[in-house]
Image (spheres, rainbow, N blue to C red):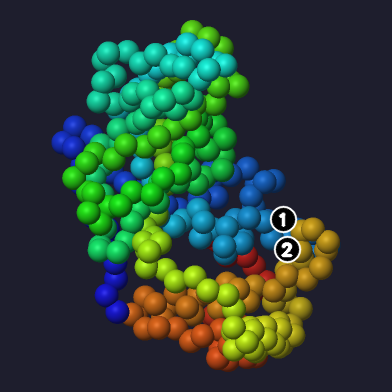
Amino acid sequence: MERPLIKFGYDGDWVIRARAGRADRSRHAPSEYTGSAFDGKFVPAPIDCRPWVDGQMSGWDLFFSQDVSFMVTDVERGLFSVPAEMTGKIGTFGPFHLGVYSGVRIKTAPGWVTLVDRVADPKLRDSLPFSTEAAILETDWYFWFKNFVVIRPLLSRFTPMDVVNIERGTPLCRIRVLPRQELVAHEEFTADDYEELKRASEAYTEEELSMNAQQRFRAAGDGGLFYPIYKLRSAKQRMSWGRGEEPTRASDASGPGNAAEDGRSQGEPDDE
């Protein structure tokens, strides 16, 4: 199976490269994002949740490749003043918004586009003086332009005449590659789909019940039991796709015994 390709191009003086997304424990306060002991069982937290970690790791980070600055001139109307020396780096983009030139050109395979999204890392995102507006760039044909990322300064943090300085290397956005919406069909579940859902759910539950107490985590909310089956199944799916093979459908997956194939102690969380 041919993998969709994404290419990055950079201006000569914009030297900060796109970086694959990652989930880094060191960036998060332990009480917020890492698990802890509770009633003798491990309590899962976001860093131990496969979907959450995937959300932090998918795609690539883009950064401010130049120092930029602007002045807040009117908080109520969302107006800014940008110095002349910032031309080509940052500019006004209507009320409440500024446009940042990323210095990065992106080219994707035909039928694939680029989603510009907010900075993924939650602690970094909360520390920034702006939010990034989501956008879809049709980078399968529009790849020669130095991509323009729209940000919305958080005006509640400023007063008129405040000068905002953003240093080179500050996270700007996360980009992800998606298939064109025109290529994705949309329809309701059929009776056969619901039958498949029922079979998949029963197989999943059967696998849960086959796990022993050492393979379970204590849930943080109500103290119930949490089974790491999603992570185990996910590992198999990733291995199949990585080999260029279409993985087994959920309803056809084998039942009890899958947990042992993971090869790791399930009493401990993943160190993502």
Using the image as rendered, state which of residue 4 and residue 191 is in the foreground.
191
Which residue type carries mark 2? Phe
Residue sitting at x 64%, y 50%: 33
Q: Give yes or no for contact between labels 2 and 1 (Cβ–Cβ under 8 Å).
A: yes
> Where is residue 125 drawn, in percent x and y?
53, 38
Q: Secondary structure at mark 2?
A: strand
Q: Nearer the viewer, residue 75 or 43?
A: 75
Left or right: 222, with 169 as reference point: right
Quarter of image, res 99: top left
Residue designated by label 2: 42
Q: Earlier in the sequence, mark 2 or mark 1?
A: 1
Q: Is residue 207 left or right of residue 101?
A: right
Q: Residue furthest left?
A: 12
Q: Is residue 255 above or below residue 25?
A: below
Q: Do we see residue 238 in this rendering?
A: yes
Q: Is residue 108 left or right of residue 27?
A: left
In the image, residue 222 lies at what x, y percent? 83, 61
Q: Quadrant of residue 242?
A: bottom left
Q: Is residue 198 above or below residue 172?
A: below
Going by the numbered disc 1, the residue's amino acid type is Ser
Q: Is residue 211 visible?
A: no
Residue that mark 1 sits on: 36
Q: Which mark is residue 250?
A: none
Image quadrant where one finds the N terminus? bottom left
Badge 1 marks a residue whose secondary structure is strand
Q: Residue at x 18, y 45 (%)?
A: 144
Q: Residue at x 29, y 26 (%)?
A: 89
Residue 86 shown left or right of residue 157 in the figure? left
| Rendering coords of residue 259 (x, y %) | 61, 83
Q: CA distance from mark 2 to mark 1?
A: 6 Å
Placement of 4 over or under 200, stated as above or below = above
